[in-house]
Image: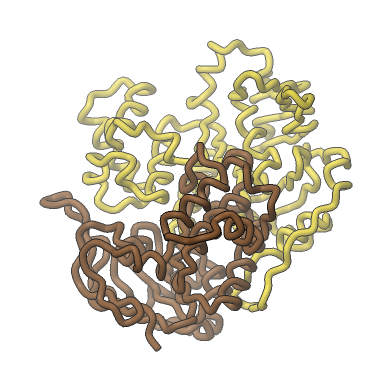
Chain colours: A brown, B yellow
Amino acid sequence: MTMINVKNLNVWFGRGRDRVDAVKGATFAVERGDSFGLVGESGSGKSTILRAIMGLAPDWSGQITVDGNVISGRRKPAFYKQVQMVFQDPYASLHPRHSVDQVLGETLFLHGFEGIDTRVAKLLDDVGLGAKFRFRYPHQLSGGQRQRVAIARALAAEPQILLLDEPTSALDVSVQAEILNLLADLREERGLTYVMVSHDLSVVGHMCNNLAVMKDGEIVEIMGVDALRNMQAKHPYSQHLLEASV
Amino acid sequence: MTLLDVKNLWVKFPSRHGVFDAVRGVSFTLGRERLGIVGESGSGKSLTGRSILKLIRPPGIMTADQISLEGEDLMQKSEKEMQAVRGQRISMVMQDPKFSLNPVMTIGEQIMEAYRLHNSVGKKAAFIKAVEMLEAVSIRDAERVMRAYPHEMSGGMGQRIMIAMMLIPNPQILIADEPTSALDVSVQRQVLDIMDKLVTERGMGLIFISHDLNLVADFCDRVLIMYAGRIVEVCDADKLHEAKHPYTQGLLNSLPRLDAPCARLKVLQRDPAWSEAPSVSGRI
């Protein structure tokens, strides 16, 4: 069953001579429980697609369907219970003066959950942090620990879909391995659907089943991960990317 | 020929819990070559780069037996004399373009300012030079970028703009602190090619600080591997994959690989003994 269906998506910023068409006619579908990768160079519009799905891009046209519902206008609270996003930079995406407890507690409260106290403890446990991190502030955490908090915050709503915007590009390789393992485990346990943006083909090759290659706002190729591993890219740009990353 | 000679460099931060040694007795030399420094965040690689320019702010304390730039000891120089070294003779590309670019100036104004500080030229010539430099770091539509503000740029573009600014004064040594971490593989290659050209054509020395082992193995001539403020291993870049230290091996094993898929990645197991062992010298 199709979980996310994006048809002919256009996203643009600015107007007049400064208008930038960030995404042009993107079409792809993600099956339930699948992990889909978006790769391409910076400025190719891969993060913008995620932001358009989340409702963070003001000007867009086309059709986005999530779990059978066509999305339009302002997102409803129910949408955010289903779809959550993990951002690229864990240093920028956590409030510097809110403790981990406040970050997760407030999120749970806003989603209307009961028993916040036990849920916070469970969330921390799920992302492998444990109770001793509960009352720390972001500056007392390492990059990997912060990204775990950001993942816990996204999981607080018990979503079915996680949009991952370069979740490990700000982290060291040794920490990246831990976070990628955590994300793989969570997907298996909860049957989550991932859409993952990355510029690192080997990370996408490790995490995803299918991927789309983007260039200048357009999807140039959609392929399976086996084709990627066997270097069977069809489009010259994807071949170029593959060659550069091996 | 040796451009830079660093002997027994320490960087210390006094804190309530005693003195924290961020860099502990590091020695290395730099010729007209590409020297890589790799390690995780917190291993002291960035501080090593900064201390060469004496950019350690109080309360941090840096000490060294010697940091000589073509025979001149930088440790003896006053702050004022250092100003003539920074940017002119040793240039540094910082880690994060978001914090290094002025958020309330357009990109064009910033590059032109940097150029006109070092060269007495008119606005028009500076504009042409700035556009040329932006194109040299393969930014499309350079004239639109000149009018834009840093927040309108993606991380990769910001970093390329930083590199363009650093290249203008034509320094002898370029210290690049994670210059390509925010870039994707295809652009990374282009930026590295530009830096490579500089090192070979102008005979510059390059200190390339990165956490990306494969990149360093590919791009540099010699690599220093740092852990907890010390150099744990020095090796030729093309022999990095034969590295002997368990830390280097652990880092290499934790990378996902396209040609060898696996269900779970190996996680680095740290040994406290690694941080106790004395620093290896990177001098030739």
Q: How many marks?
A: 0
Which of the 4 quarters of the picture holds residue A80? bottom left
Quadrant where the image shows the C terminus of chain B: top right
B113 lies above or below B137: above
Identify which residue is drawn at 35% across, 68% down: A78
**What is the residue that sits farthest to the bottom in this orientation?**
A1
Point out residue B22 in the picture as x, y percentages from the top left corner: 72, 33
Quadrant where the image shows the N terminus of chain B: top right
A147 lies above or below B111: below
Identify which residue is drawn at 36% across, 31% down: B102
The answer to whether residue B259 of the structure is visible from this angle is yes
Point out residue B24 in the picture as x, y percentages from the top left corner: 78, 32
Identify which residue is drawn at 88% across, 42% down: B277
Foreground residue, B69 or A204? A204
**Drawn side of residue B219 relative to residue A201, left or right:** right
Point out residue B278 in the picture as x, y percentages from the top left corner: 87, 38
Foreground residue, A224 or A236? A224
Which of the 4 quarters of the picture holds residue B77? top right
Foreground residue, B229 or B69? B229
**What is the residue that sits farthest to the front in this orientation?**
A114
Which of the 4 quarters of the picture holds residue B239? bottom right
Foreground residue, B176 or A213? A213
Identify which residue is drawn at 42% across, 40% down: B98
Point out residue A151 in the picture as x, y percentages from the top left corner: 54, 59
**What is the residue that sits farthest to the left in this orientation?**
A16
**Drawn side of residue A79 relative to residue A70, left or right:** right
The answer to whether residue B183 of the structure is visible from this angle is no
